Image (cartoon, rainbow, N blue to C red):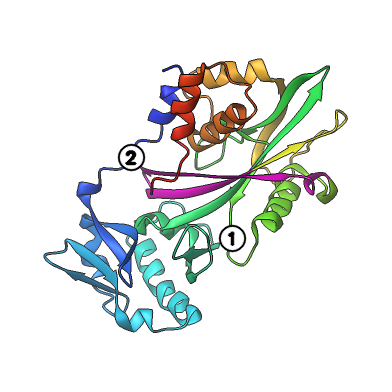
């Protein structure tokens, strides 16, 4: 399949190396078996049973308030950092939820620690495009060379993780302003187009991500401007050039490539037949 390399860039983790982690009987993450000795030193938070084949949040932890759970996890987070296990400490809290619908918040946790527990993290991605002479032109960003993750790879016009206590749309406004200097009134018409879920393993742990996708049509005179140093440059390319980049190896940040492929498929702009489209679209159905 023409775009198989995009799917292969986010391979499923080898879960044989991990112990499932549950909250009141519902699996919400995984713990690397090599790290269980550290987590086991926090019995008020975790319990491991059956020769470490199962892990769960301790009943004492479950009975705490969200604030107390979050406070208890601060000590754990610092310990993991001191042990050199947190490779991407961000000084930013993510809300962890019981389900993908984000209706039941469990606690807040340092963003860099989330992959070490394979907990579900959320982010927003904005597909910005402009129609010029009936030809779609898509805005993409090239990430700065100093990015810890995927330096100089191509990205959506705007993308970012979802901090605690922000709605999806408010986070979109925040990221659009911080990354590209886009005024709120230009982002306001952005339409939510659903989410993409994937699980993969990298040097930070297990990425168990939900990417919330927005589309916005922008005026021809629009031009983004880098604000926070995260972007090397912005480019508006004809859809054919974006497709050409997707067809090449290792051009896009891997999860960004999924969002872009999904965007193009939804608009029928990707050069695939009906069977290939159905096969690719099936990948975006929730499987976690």
Specify whether residue 151 is in view: no
Secondary element at tag 2? loop
User: Mark 2 sits on what residue?
Assistant: 12
Specify whether residue 257 is in view: yes
Quick one: label 1 or label 2, which is nearer the N terminus?
2
Which is in the foreground here, disc 1 or disc 2?
2
Residue neighbourhood size for the residue with mark 1, other residues' Cα within 10 Å, grouped as few (<14), some (14–19), many (≥20): many
Q: Residue 166: percent from the left, percent from the top?
A: 64, 63
Seen from the viewer's position, the closer of residues 4 and 84 is 4
Q: Residue 132: percent from the left, percent from the top?
A: 82, 20
Residue neighbourhood size for the residue with mark 2, other residues' Cα within 10 Å, grouped as few (<14), some (14–19), many (≥20): some
Q: Residue 31: percent from the left, percent from the top?
A: 28, 58
192 horizontally vs 181: left or right: left
Quarter of the figure with residue 246: top right
Res. 136 mark: none
Identified at 47% across, 83% down, the residue is 65
Which secondary structure is most common in the magenta stretch? strand
Confirm whether the magenta stretch covers residue 200.
yes
Q: Give, as a single range, the part of the protein colored magenta.
A: 186-213
Q: Is residue 75 above or below residue 283?
A: below
Seen from the viewer's position, the closer of residues 2 and 267 is 267
Q: Is residue 234 above or below residue 146?
A: above
Identified at 53% across, 17% down, the residue is 272
116 horizontally vs 120: left or right: left
Secondary element at tag 1? loop
Identified at 22% across, 63% down, the residue is 36
User: Mark 1 sits on what residue?
Assistant: 163
């Amino acid at each position: 399949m023409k775009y198989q390399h995009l799917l292969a860039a986010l391979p499923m983790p080898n879960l044989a190396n991990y112990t499932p982690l549950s909250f009141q009987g519902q699996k919400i993450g995984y713990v690397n078996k090599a790290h269980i000795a550290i987590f086991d030193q926090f019995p008020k938070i975790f319990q491991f049973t059956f020769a470490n084949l199962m892990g769960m949040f301790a009943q004492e932890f479950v009975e705490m308030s969200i604030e107390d759970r979050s406070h208890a996890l601060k000590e754990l987070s610092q310990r993991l950092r001191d042990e050199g296990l947190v490779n991407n400490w961000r000084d930013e809290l993510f809300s962890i939820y019981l389900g993908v619908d984000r209706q039941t918040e469990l606690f807040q946790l340092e963003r860099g620690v989330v992959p070490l527990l394979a907990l579900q993290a959320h982010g927003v991605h904005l597909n910005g495009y402009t129609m010029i002479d009936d030809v779609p032109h898509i805005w993409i960003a090239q990430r700065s060379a100093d990015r810890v993750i995927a330096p100089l790879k191509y990205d959506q016009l705007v993308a970012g993780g979802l901090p605690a206590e922000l709605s999806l749309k408010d986070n979109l406004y925040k990221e659009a302003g911080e990354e590209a200097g886009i005024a709120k009134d230009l982002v306001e018409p952005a339409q939510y187009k659903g989410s993409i879920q994937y699980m993969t393993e990298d040097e930070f742990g297990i990425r168990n991500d939900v990417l919330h996708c927005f589309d916005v049509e922008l005026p021809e005179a629009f031009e983004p401007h880098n604000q926070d140093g995260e972007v090397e440059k912005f480019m508006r390319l004809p859809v054919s050039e974006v497709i050409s980049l997707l067809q090449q190896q290792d051009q896009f940040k891997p999860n960004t490539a999924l969002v872009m492929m999904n965007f193009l498929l939804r608009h029928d702009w990707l050069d695939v037949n009906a069977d290939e489209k159905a096969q690719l679209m099936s990948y975006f159905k929730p499987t976690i």
